[in-house]
Amino acid sequence: MPASQPAQRSLVPELGAGLVTTLVGFTSSFAVVLTGLAAVGASQAQAASGLGALCLIVGLGTLGLSIATRRPVTLAWSTPGAALLGGSAALPGGFGDAVGAFLACAAAIVVTGLWPRLGELVGRIPASLAQAMLAGVLLPLCLAPVTAAAANPAWVLPTVLVWVLGLRWWPRWAVPAAFAAALASVGVAFLIGVAHVEASALAPSLELVAPSLSWPAVVGIALPLYIVTMASQNVPGVAVMASFGYTVPWRATLLVTGAGSAASALAGGHAINLAAISAALAAGEESGVPREARWRSAAFAGALYVALAAGAAALAAIALAAPGGLLVAVAGLALIATLGSAVQGAWEDSPSRIAVVATFLVAASGVSVAGIGAAFWALVVGLALRWAPGRRGAGGPARPVPPDARRRSARPVASASVAQVSQSAFLEADRGKLGHAALAEGRLGGQAKV
């Protein structure tokens, strides 16, 4: 009698982890993407196309990297980058200029993968100033739930209440639950005739955008977008994977995300990078998937993102029809945790407190000078104050600093350690030498973003 074959293990845990990774990653930040693209001149059709392109490229890139490396490498769109767009000034060439800036950012990501010295150059920007710039950009967006609730309480307050209850009872799902509540409100708006959507807007489509280049777009959007994508997404993504014992193929990942960013840019998408928080959902022990099989969870997540691309246009059309500032309110709720992380990272650098505060204030002001947005000028002001002669005495008489505080202030804030990761990950990650030791040294322990 033939021997019985061993029972095959079910793939349900991997599929479940992939589904959770996709749902949390998508619902927690897609409203931020739509808000950001609209702010830089995208029409409703172009914003929907951009979201669909991002879903498609994120899915294909995640599928390719996870299958090729047999590691749970997951990609995402740049949520801080989308928030940066939401606070940007109008461009002289409209959305075409923004697409040109997206392409420039994509090219910089590819060059970083091929030539690590570019990462070194970006790494010279102090982490505290990069975080202060991001916090200033996020502040007006995070105030949107407050102003929208005051102006239209009937539409916005139920969503805010669901978010608050979610923070208490199911923190991981607080933003997705708020999004579900917002969709319910939009459904009510359709029923009573307050909102409507053309049937043609529900069909999946990709709308190609002719790029154009202008200095305000390159300096005011492409450069800050590259900085926040590298410092607030790619580097924390390496840290998250290292915390679970996985090394990231740094060069291959940058080449894939850079090329993918360029492809999505032509259809209106802004930037793609390593996932951070959502990566933990596929790579962590809490997924219930054996370590050697977690790459399948990432692969399933990639496949689900590809499927979501088909429905992105319909979802975007419905979300953009939301009444009473509901969409920007959901986007603001989704960014509050990111704002908290950015503020914490910025204020760790106590010797440069004045430069940090000035960077934050300029970025939050939303000013545009010579057509260039506030994010760029915030970095210029912060760097000038940080490196100005006698800056350490600007706050008053010098006080003795305890040795332990001196050591703490000298510790680099790893969320912007682009130079370190560009060098060590480029040279070592593919040989399996980047792991828990790097985290213990504080080189990679940055604040993770979705």
Image: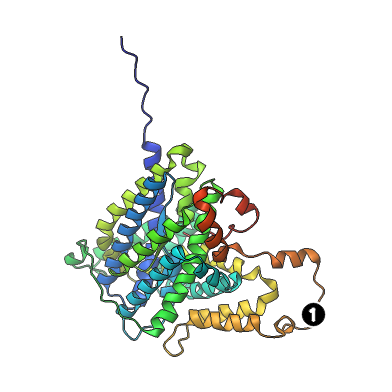
At horizontal 41% and vertical 88% (from top left) the residue drawn is 371
Horizontal side of 11 relative to 416 (left or right) equals left
Q: How many marks?
A: 1
- Circle 1 Cα neighbour tier, 10 Å, few/some/many (<14 / 14–19 / ≥20): few
Horizontal side of 105 relative to 382 (left or right) equals left
SS label for mark 1: loop
Looking at the rendered structure, the kind of residue marked 1 is: Ala
Q: Residue extending furthest bottom?
A: 370
Which of these two is toward me, 250 or 105?
A: 250
Residue 327 in the image, given as x and y percentages of width and height: 37, 68
At horizontal 74% and vertical 64% (from top left) the residue drawn is 407
Picture quadrant of residue 212: bottom left
Residue 135 can be seen, yes or no: yes
Residue under label 1: 398
Which of these two is toward me, 388 or 88?
A: 388
Measured along the vertical axis of the image, is residue 398 above or below residue 441?
A: below
* Quadrant, the N terminus: top left
Q: Residue extending furthest left?
A: 200
Measured along the vertical axis of the image, is residue 150 above or below residue 247?
A: below
Residue 98 in the image, given as x and y percentages of width and height: 35, 77
Residue 47 in the image, given as x and y percentages of width and height: 30, 70
Residue 170 can be seen, yes or no: no
Picture quadrant of residue 59: bottom left
Identify the colour scheme used: rainbow
Picture quadrant of residue 272: bottom left
Residue 298 in the image, given as x and y percentages of width and height: 40, 47
Which of these two is toward me, 294 or 254?
A: 254
